[in-house]
Amino acid sequence: MSEFNCYSRRRFLHAASLGGIALSLTAPLRGVLAEAPPQNAITPQAALNRLLAGNVRYAANKFDPKDFSVGRAARARAQYPIASILGCADSRVAPELMFDQAPGDLFVVRIAGNYLNRDALSSLEYGVGVLGTPLVMVLGHSNCGAVKATIEEIRDSKPLPGHIWDITDAVRAGIENVVKSGGDNLLERAIEANTEYNAARTASAQPIISEAVKNGRAMVVAAEYELATGKVRLLKY
């Protein structure tokens, strides 16, 4: 056998041995990667921090670059959103944009006035109980038309067309005391009251969300989006 052939044979055997080692290492590695925790296997505070950091980028117009095709196949199989959001249907309020998140990151329920009804609750329960979102955010916004209409309806009740009265009837519960008390900045205070009221109702909603909150697996927060600045601020409730 020539020296070249001996060298080739040794190189082949060496490569084969390395390949065997690589295969023996790759199999467990694949298992580890396959069992990697989903993105929403984080604490409620970590999820909130991620949203607030994204909002800082949004307000500064410094979005993270995104390739929307990456992960599309994985998203077709499953979703692991980091937060469930109950927001207003207002066209100027887009949670995925204001928090600079990608498809699959947020589980969003939108209804004019961001109030909690049975349909919204069932969706939020699905987010927390089935999808495992560690955070629920009730998101109001400045200059909310639904709250404004409810203030007007409380002050001077008039028939509203179609089913629009359903909105004012639902929002009324959270803001009526504020409206009747009067004072300055009434619209803003009513918006905050409506958001905080529905956040409190969400946090205490049985059995799924209240239990998750009690166990520390989920957190409910109230927040308001400011249309003029693009900033989100947390509210107390």
Image: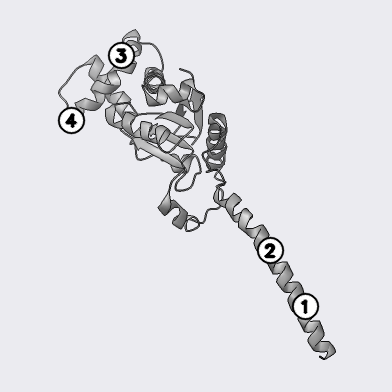
Q: Residue furthest right?
A: 3
Instruction: Name which residue lies at 76% across and 73% down.
Output: 14
- For discs 3 and 1, the disc positioned in front in the rendered view: 1
Q: Residue 236 placed where, x, y %?
A: 48, 18
Mark 4 vs 2, N-terminal side: 2
- For discs 1 and 4, the disc positioned in front in the rendered view: 1
Q: Secondary structure at mark 1?
A: helix
Number of the label disc, if any, that sits on residue 163:
4
Mark 1 vs 2, N-terminal side: 1
Q: Secondary structure at mark 2?
A: helix
* Figure quadrant of residue 5: bottom right
Number of the label disc, if any, that sits on residue 176:
3
| Vertical order, 101 against 124 (above or below) | below
Mark 1 vs 4, N-terminal side: 1
133 vs 8, left or right, is left
Q: Residue 207 placed where, x, y %?
A: 36, 23
Q: Residue 142 placed where, x, y %?
A: 41, 29
Mark 4 touching mark 2, by CB under 8 A? no
Tell me if residue 184 can be seen. Answer: yes
Question: As shown in the figure, which amino acid type bears the numbered disc 1?
Answer: Arg
Q: Secondary structure at mark 4?
A: loop
Mark 2 vs 3, N-terminal side: 2
Mark 1 touching mark 4, by CB under 8 A? no
Question: Which residue matches tag 1?
Answer: 11
Instruction: Name which residue lies at 34% across and 34% down.
Output: 123
Q: Secondary structure at mark 3?
A: helix
- What is the spatial separation of the Cα atoms under label 3 and label 1, in whole angstroms? 83 Å
Q: Report the front residue among 118 and 128.
A: 128
Question: As shown in the figure, which amino acid type bears the numbered disc 2?
Answer: Ala
Question: Which residue matches tag 2?
Answer: 22
